[in-house]
Image (tube, rainbow, N blue to C red):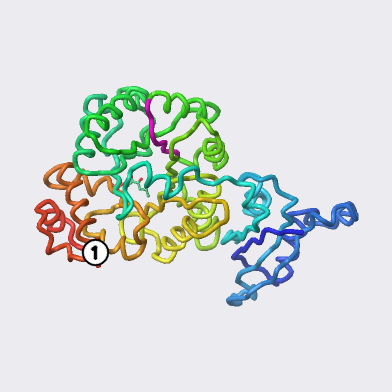
């Protein structure tokens, strides 16, 4: 029989006993003795403790540390709502407990299709294979008329980006309606003669998102942006599984902080933004970088990236996008930490360049080129890059 192993950080009088209580209580039993739980036919559904590691004993005499509980794979249907409800549904409300990690056996992961494109599929679409990709974010888009938004798109493309993403807060788009801006941005891309993916924000009632995605693609959309946590992991999985949705899906981490910020409660960021996003089918996964605004501790950001790309049989890697507050002076550090296969992503760091967004884009392109050639940024001949460094500095 195969098991999913779940690690929790928690506290109790006895961590060993707590692990055993969860193993029974979250599978066939409850908080009290249930005669029905002892039936022979239910035993294959019974969880089991895989041990406890005590880190410290509190002044109140409570053990604090890590417990591991194994859940039989037969208890799950193959989707993230089933997974999360079983391993951290009611349990998430049971005092000080944090879901740290889940180890999946192949019997479970092989039922998921994961990203449709993954890193190599996106590189093929863009025909870029030898450097990190470069993405810009629309900034100041709510309330902008279509022509101004399209002009902003044009400037970002001129700056040399490979991808442009809508700002994730762009829901109220009546001045630049969804299908109109897809068509208009497609024209700009075609006229530029470059390959650019435009991740348009997929918004509206969740029940209509699959149809809306298909309409977007019929009108020329070549990438979709989804606020996965507000909408739910399962809609990402549905979009990703649908054979007619044949464009990459970019997963935004909006709301993730509500889950991972506490060290005592919630769900760890490597699990939410790494393992689960990939399993649910994100081709491109955004997460806070270790050094910009809304920064994550470095090791957490590295762990997210590792989960997005590590070998899982049958599941393609998700493109990691360490984001938020990124400027050109961070490019060498991003490359050192995340390597060739990541996407350099910036909003303010492009639009806030003293020379405007074209110069902002060019500064990043020069920073990526210099980094790939091992040239220190301050020795670059790009005036746009030197101006960016003067404004934001170089992060070492
Ligand atoms: C972690 C998500 C980053 C994001 O979506 C965003 O809009 C960043 O903007 P900037 O680069 O911080 O201006």
Q: Is 106 positioned to the left or the right of 340 in the image?
A: right
Q: Residue at x 50, y 42 (%)?
A: 116
Front-lying residue, 214 or 355: 214
Confirm whether the magenta stretch covers residue 96: no
Front-lying residue, 238 or 312: 312
Q: Is 26 positioned to the left or the right of 129 in the image?
A: right
Task: Say which element carries label 1.
Answer: loop
Residue 149 in the image: state x and y as whole percent. 25, 30
Q: Is 370 positioned to the left or the right of 104 in the image?
A: left
Confirm whether the magenta stretch covers residue 221: yes
- Count the labels in the image: 1
Front-lying residue, 342 or 263: 342
Judge whether 349 appears above or below 390 on screen. above
Q: Is 149 positioned to the left or the right of 6 in the image?
A: left
Q: Quadrant of residue 238?
A: top right
Q: Residue at x 26, y 62 (%)?
A: 332
Disc 1 CB within 8 Å of nearest ligand 1 atom: no
Q: Residue at x 32, y 26 (%)?
A: 181
Note whether residue 324 is visible. no
What crowding class fits label 1: few (fewer than 14 Cα within 10 Å), some (14-19), or many (20 or more)?
some
Front-lying residue, 23 or 313: 313
The span shown in magenta is 220-226
Residue 275 in the image: state x and y as whole percent. 53, 54
Residue 388 in the image: state x and y as whole percent. 15, 54
Note whether residue 12 is visible. yes
Q: Residue at x 36, y 55 (%)?
A: 342
Residue 363 in the image: state x and y as whole percent. 17, 51
**Split into 4 quadrants, where in the image is the C terminus?**
bottom left
Query: Mark 1 highlights which residue?
Result: 395
**Split into 4 quadrants, where in the image is the N terminus?**
bottom right
């Amino acid at each position: 029989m195969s098991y999913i192993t779940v690690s929790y950080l928690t506290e109790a009088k006895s961590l060993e006993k707590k692990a055993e209580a969860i193993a029974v209580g979250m599978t066939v039993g409850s908080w009290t003795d249930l005669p029905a739980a002892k039936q022979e036919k239910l035993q294959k559904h019974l969880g089991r403790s895989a041990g406890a590691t005590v880190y410290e004993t509190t002044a109140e005499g409570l053990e604090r540390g890590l417990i591991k509980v194994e859940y039989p794979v037969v208890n799950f249907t193959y989707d993230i709502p089933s997974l999360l409800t079983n391993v951290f549904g009611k349990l998430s409300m049971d005092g000080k407990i944090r879901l740290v990690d889940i180890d999946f056996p192949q019997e479970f992961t092989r039922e998921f299709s994961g990203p449709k494109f993954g890193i190599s599929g996106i590189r093929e679409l863009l025909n870029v294979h030898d450097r990190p990709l470069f993405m810009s974010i629309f900034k100041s888009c709510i309330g902008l008329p279509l022509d101004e938004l399209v002009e902003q798109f044009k400037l970002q493309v001129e700056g040399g980006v490979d991808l442009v993403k809508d700002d994730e807060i762009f829901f109220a788009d009546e001045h630049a309606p969804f299908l109109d801006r897809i068509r208009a941005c497609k024209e700009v891309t075609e006229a530029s003669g470059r390959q650019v993916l435009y991740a348009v924000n997929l918004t509206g009632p969740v029940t209509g998102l699959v149809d809306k995605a298909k309409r977007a693609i019929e009108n020329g959309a070549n990438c979709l942006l989804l606020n996965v946590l507000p909408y739910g992991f399962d809609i990402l999985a549905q979009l990703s599984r649908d054979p007619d949705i044949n464009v990459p899906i970019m997963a935004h981490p909006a709301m993730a902080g509500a889950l991972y910020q506490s060290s005592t409660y919630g769900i760890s960021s490597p699990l939410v933004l790494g393992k689960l996003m990939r399993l649910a089918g994100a081709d491109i996964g955004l997460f806070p970088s270790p050094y910009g605004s809304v920064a994550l501790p470095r090791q957490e950001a590295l762990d997210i990236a590792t989960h997005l790309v590590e070998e899982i049989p049958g599941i393609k890697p998700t493109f990691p996008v360490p984001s938020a507050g990124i400027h050109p002076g961070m490019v060498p550090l991003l490359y050192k930490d995340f390597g060739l296969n990541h996407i350099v992503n910036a909003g303010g760091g492009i639009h806030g360049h003293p020379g405007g967004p074209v110069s902002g884009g060019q500064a990043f392109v020069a920073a990526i080129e210099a980094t790939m050639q091992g040239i220190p940024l301050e020795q670059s001949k790009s005036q746009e890059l030197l101006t960016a460094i003067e404004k934001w500095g170089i992060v070492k």
